[in-house]
Amino acid sequence: EFILEGLSDHPKMKAVLFVVFLIIYMITLLGNMGIIVVIRGDPRLHTSMYFFLGSLSVVDICFSSVIAPKTLVNFLSETKTISFVGCTGQAFFYIVFVTTECFLLAVMAYDRYVAICSPLLYSVVMTRRRCIQLVVGSYLGGIINSVIQMIFIIRLPFCNSNVINHFFCDVPPLLALSCTNTYINEMILFSLAGVIELSTVSTILVSYIFISFAILRIRSADGRQKAFSTCASHLTAVSMLYGTTIFMYLRPSSSYSLNSDKVVSVFYTVVIPMLNPLIYSLRNKEVKDALRR
């Protein structure tokens, strides 16, 4: 079994962190469930854009639930142990959901591109079947990425310390515990993260380049504002997630600092899933109107 070092060993700090993490986790669950309920309950929101938003909320709930419950238990426990199966399971599902979220954000950018650049073809291109295929494909991408990484991780011998310098089982701190050369694992992590980030970021950038040109061709200021407002919340979510994941996984291993990485990890594993429903609801007129009803 492993021991998760966590964020702090100070009793008072652990109590404060428990309360903070519990509040954030509850807001995450309530906010994302609220988005799902509102979208399903309002026929006017039964479009592809809100189908993807609802799918993103499901991923955020799962993503947060992989990390937060065990972290909360560890804040109250003297022995912060986790079994090998539990640790690899947590790492597996964490990789699945963070990768799925990256693909979903790229899909949402493509959806906005079709809606703004080809509005007359929107209902033809973004059919219900196509939307389901894109969401399923996002999950498959996450599963494939996770399976490849975990196959190489579970084969590693862990004969050094069993203390993981993190508050959850992530790949870099697990590699740090191995008593063998992890160069291949590091290259696989870097390569897969690079391919996923490059492909999804390229999709998002190209989509928004075309969207920007389309918005500039709109003559009325109100029309430009309406078109931009549908993209602003998505761009905010993209910036937060990709900024932190690129910092975490697309650096050479020599520059890793597990202590500073823990702080960054808190932001994208705990805070971002809480902020996403707030960003999409507060900056989306249709969602706000549905919430009022």
Image (tube, rainbow, N blue to C red):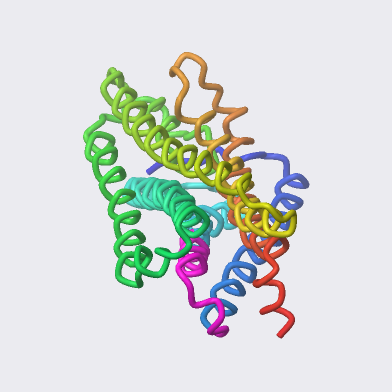
> Secondary structure of the magenta portion, mostly?
helix
Q: At x 31% / y 65%, what residue is drawn?
A: 130
Front position in the image: 238 or 118: 118
Front position in the image: 291 or 203: 203
Front position in the image: 170 or 188: 188
Image quadrant containing the N terminus: top left
Q: At x 26% / y 22%, what residue is drawn?
A: 184
Image quadrant containing the C terminus: bottom right
Left or right of 10: which side holds 172? left
Q: Where does the magenta region start and end? A: 41-59
Please state the horizontal and vertical placement of residue 238, each as a whole percent of the image.
56, 45
In the displayed image of the protein, which residue is found farthest to the front?
219
Q: Is residue 242 above or below residue 279?
A: above
Please state the horizontal and vertical placement of residue 154, each as a whole percent of the image.
25, 38
Please state the horizontal and vertical placement of residue 254, each as a whole percent of the image.
47, 14
Please state the horizontal and vertical placement of residue 273, each as a whole percent of the image.
58, 55
In the rendered image, residue 46 lying in the magenta stretch gets the answer yes
